[in-house]
Each structure stands twice: as C-alpha cells, then as structure tokens.
Image (spheres, grey):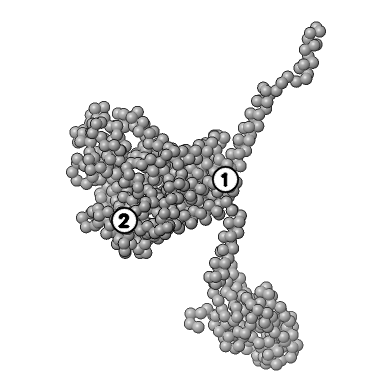
Amino acid sequence: MAGDSPHGTMLDDADRNGSDQRGPGSPGALDKPGGAAGETAGKAADKSAGTVGGTASAVPAAPSANRSGASGKSSGKRVKTSPVTTVGADKAVDSGEDSGDSAGAPADGPAGGAARGAVRPSAWERGRDRMRGRVREALRGGVRNRVRDGVRNGPPAVAERVRSGTVRLWAAARRHPFFAVILAIAALLRAVAMVGYTPAMFFNDSFDYLHVAMQPYPHPLRPDGYSFLLIALKPFHSFALVTGIQHLMGLAMGVMIYALLRRKFGVWKWVSAVATAPVLLDGYQIQLEHLILSDTMFTFLVMCAVTLLLWHDRPSWRIAASVGLIIGLSWLTRSVGAPVLLGVLTYMLIRRVGWRMLAVTTVACALPVVSYMGWYKADSGKFAITESNGIFLFARVYKFADCHRMDDLPVSEMILCTEPGNRLPNSQDGIWNVKSPLNRYTGNRFGPYQNSLANDFSKRAILAQPVDYARVVGHDFLRVFQWKRTTFPDPATYGQYEFGKTTKELPDWHMDADSIASAEANAYERGRARTKIIEPFGTAIRVYQDHVYLRGTMVGLILLVGLGGMVPMWRRFGGRALLPWTLATGLLLAPAATAEFDYRYVLPAVPLASLAAGIAFSPEVRERYAALARRLRPATGAEAAPPTGPVEEKVPEVAAK
C-alpha cells in the first residue's frame, strides 16, 4: 500500500500468498528474511533445494520466533507461532510440508552450508540479524507493531491504552485511598460548577483581560500574563475551556501538595490527604477557578516553582532555569510575583545551592520580564510593567494621609489631600469611586503623570505617619483570620465572589473608543457569553459554597501548624518548610501593605500554607520533637521523684554521731 513501510509491503505479499489464516493456536510459518539480502538468499536456496521449504528445514528456527512464543521443529511440519509476533516476522512462508519436499532433505547453497556448520554466515542469516537489530531498536524506541489475524497494526489500540490506564489509575487509587476520595469529590464538584454556571463567571477585572486578548497591548493597570492565556485559547472560542483548564490547575495543585508530602517528606497518607482539602474542597476556591481572573493561574505557577525547588535538594541549572522562568511568568500574571522572586532567592541562598544557580534563576526570570518591559516601552515610552503601582499605594494611604503633617508637599500633590470628614468609607474608593481625588486631574486616571504624583504623595504620607501606616496594614492583615466572612468591600463586589441565584447582563462599559465590554466577551465566545444557571446543578454548588469553605481562623491555624513545624528546625532556618510558609505569609501581607484587603487575595496563599503545615508532620520534624521531649523528661522526673531508700538510711547514722 502507498505510504506503508517495507514491513507492511511484505505483510501484504504474505496476505496475497494465503498466509493470513493464522489465529491463536493455529499453525504458523517460519520467518523468511526481509530486504535485499533476504531475496538473494531466497533465490540461492531455490536453485539448490528447489523449494523454500528445503531451505527452511535446514536452518534452525529464528530466535526471535522463539522469544515470541513460537515452537516447532525443522522436520517439515508447520511451526506454531503466537498470535503476536515482532517486526522481524516480515513474511510467512510455506514449510516443506506445503511444498512437497521431504522433511529431512539436505539443502545445498548458502542455507545448506550454514546447516552443515559453515563458519561464514549466509546471506539469509546476515539479513535476519540485521532485521533483528532493527526490531530491537524499534522496541527500545517504544514502537511496537502487532500482527493479529494477518493484519498489521500500528500502535496499541485506543481501547487497550484506556484499559491499561484505567488499571494503573485504579492501582494508584488503592494505594492512596484517602487522597483518591478527596480528589474524586473535588473533580465532581468542579464538574457540577461547570455545568451549573456555564460557560463562565465574570468579575470586573475580567473585561480588562478580555480587552487585551481581543486587541493585544501592554495594559497600564495590570500585566498581561493572564491575557496571554486567553489569547492562546482564543481559537477555540470557549470560556468553558478556559474555566476547565483553571479547574484542572486547581486539581493539579492538590496533587502537587500530596506528592511532595508523601514522596519527598514521608508524611502519613491521611495527613497528606487532609493537607490537600483546603485547596480541593473549599467552595470559594472552586468559584475563583470558575472566574475569568488571573488568580488561579498565578497560584498554579507559584506552586509549580515551589514544587520544583522542594523536589530537588540540589537543583541543576535546568531546574534553576525552569524555576526562574516560571516565577517570571507569575510576575507577568500578577505584580505580586516580584516578592515571590525575592523569597525564592532568599531560600536558595539559605540552602547554599551556589551562586551559579542563583544567577541562572535570576537571569531566567528576567528574560520574560525584561522582554515584556521592552514591549511596554515601545508602546508607551517607559521601561516598566505597569503604570499603577503609585495609584494602588495611594489607595492604601487614602484612609489616613494628613497633609498637615507632611513637610514640603508640592502644590501639584495638594489636590490629593482630603479632610477626614470627607473621606470615602473604603480604601479602594480612592481608586475606583468617581469622587476619588485622582479624578481631579485631567487626562487618563492611570496615566504616567497621575501614577507619579500618587506614588510620591503616598511615600510622603508613609514617612510622615509610619504608625498610622502600620495600623492600617495590621488591621487588614488580621482581617484575614476572622471567623465570620463579612460583606466587604461592598455588596456588589462581594457578590461576584459567590455562586449567585441570578446572573446579570454583561456590562456595557467602553473599554476604548471603539470597544464595549459585553461585545468583546460575546466576540470571544462567538455567541452569548452571559452566565447561564442550569438547575439543579447551580443550586447544588451554591448550597455547597454556603456551607463548605475555609474560614479565616482556619487559615491562621494552618499557618501556626506550619510555624510549629519550623521551630525545632531553627538551626536550619526552619528547614524546607521555610519556602512555602514565608511565601504564604508574604502573599497575605502584600495586599494589606500595598493596596487593601480582598478575599480573593487570601486564596493564593492557602496551597502554600497547607504544604508548610503538612511538612510539620514529616519524620524529621517528629524526631526533633521526640528528642526534645526525651531531654526534658529526665529533668522533670528527677524534680518530682520522692526521696530514695539510701537517703532515708543516712538519717539514723547522722543522729548516732
């Protein structure tokens, strides 16, 4: 057939010769050499013996046939072969019984000479050996050709692959039953969310990401890393595909936590499984994965970098480069990725991985970041990632900034001053509210001029009022650990973090002079993109979110457990739990220090905190605590023990004297 390999052509010839009637247990045929050498040997054998069968009867059966289960004798009878043969079985030829030759008839020519013990191998044997070599090479490369019922098949059938994968999956589930149950429930919950709220859910920021995906440009407010994912998936025109990938990222984070705790740190199976529950089973985590937002992608990238570092005690340059590249991508997904790089480099320095690995990580991280900054400069004229750092910092100081306490305040920044009685209720109002002082300037609110003024004003306020700044940062940081989840910052924003009973039309905001938010969402979907609620799945996931979620106090307990595991490792700066624990704490502290508390900023820290808490149950930490208990036990016992017998015997001796 056209396009078939030479082996396939030989099999076709064999089929035409009537050798395709073999089946399991049916008589087979001896292998005949393939290629040019085989044809020469065959002609020589025909001239000397008159039939191929004579040659076959004089030559021992090929070892490849024996390995595949073939058995038989060179006495003129058919040789039985297994239903599955190797690639070396290129032709099936008739034996001496079919050709009419006697079973033990001697054969002259090359084959006969080989049978009589000639030292030089015949052309038949040379061709056979070459073919066996090709078979071995093909098998090493993973190519397995199967001949069943005389038909040549390529790779194993899809059904067989599925069956094999199912068997391996079931075996893994039996080895890890606790985690298998949690993972299965988590996957089911995400499937219910995808069916119940289709094709996706939207947040206010979603339409900025979509706008960049439809008309790529460096956004001045937030980096475009998440928009790059939307651009990559744009040909499929499916928000359901986007959320499906994000749900897979959520499941993958749970798998990474479990794999690290079990395979790298030797934590008990049930403890490792419990450590994944805050990520896999939290109702608000599932809802966040279902939003067109960057948080899930950012958390997944950070977890990948942490997993690579913790899995390799002494990372190679390839691992270090991969970690740096992943952190660079996370930085382009959310600006808070910059502190992540600082935490990773500090951890690598403490672990003494070497300055070369530190340099490789830094350079690899800089590649995507510097490239993006170059694109930003080409578009906006400034070598930067965004033009919003000063504006967000202004939202932080908006609630306490007192212009009367600032020295030498420029006239251009006095416009940002607000008297305490006229301040809006929330810090975020300093950015988004129409009454924000930033709107007193003309031009684009997120332009370079406004960002520069807001940045300078905010730094002056922090330096003039450090105690007030520490107070608002501490207040927002402690808000993370509240037991009750309150409506914050306002009902409209908070409602976008929940599976609602109803959905709203997509907004008609003007993204630019020619683009409307709802129109761009419909264009990306190539249909109606508004969220539709499908019952009863919508009600099921909504009720689940109302009752099963991670409370703030639980987040605090998880962090305390991780910290407790670091205490006995203080000589090693907390051990390997230092990396996930410090990153989790930093991700909780960064929004409070640079902008304002928000519930969705808490969730990216949960996988890292859960990992650190799980490491606290590793054998190394348990042994440290056991050794500490052994050192404390004798001293305590000696103090509490009553006087011994010999001490009582000395009393009368003293009295006698």
Q: Residue at x 32, y 50 (%)?
A: 205
Q: Position of residue 387 (x, y in %)?
A: 28, 45
| Disc number placed over residue 271 in the picture, else none | 1
309 over 524 or under it: above or below: above
Q: Position of residue 452 (x, y in %)?
A: 25, 40
Q: Position of residue 454 (x, y in %)?
A: 26, 38
Residue 626 sits in quarter = top right
Q: Residue at x 28, y 57 (%)?
A: 518
Numbered disc in front, either 2 or 1: 1
Q: Position of residue 514 (x, y in %)?
A: 21, 57
Query: What is the quadrant of the C terminus in the image?
Result: top right
Q: Residues within 10 Å of mark 2 (few under 14, many from 20)?
A: many
Instruction: Looking at the image, tell me whether mark 2 or mark 1 is earlier in sequence order.
Output: 2
Label 1 amino acid? Val
Real-space Cα distance between discs 2 and 1? 40 Å
Left or right of 262 on screen, residue 111: right
Determine if residue 149 is in view: yes
Which residue lies under the disc numbered 2? 210
Q: Residue at x 35, y 49 (%)?
A: 496
Residue in the foreground of this view, choosing between 159 and 575: 159
Determine if residue 285 is in view: no
Residue in the foreground of this view, choosing between 159 and 530: 530
Q: Residues within 10 Å of mark 1 (few under 14, many from 20)?
A: some
Residue 645 sits in quarter = top right
* Secondary element at tag 1: helix
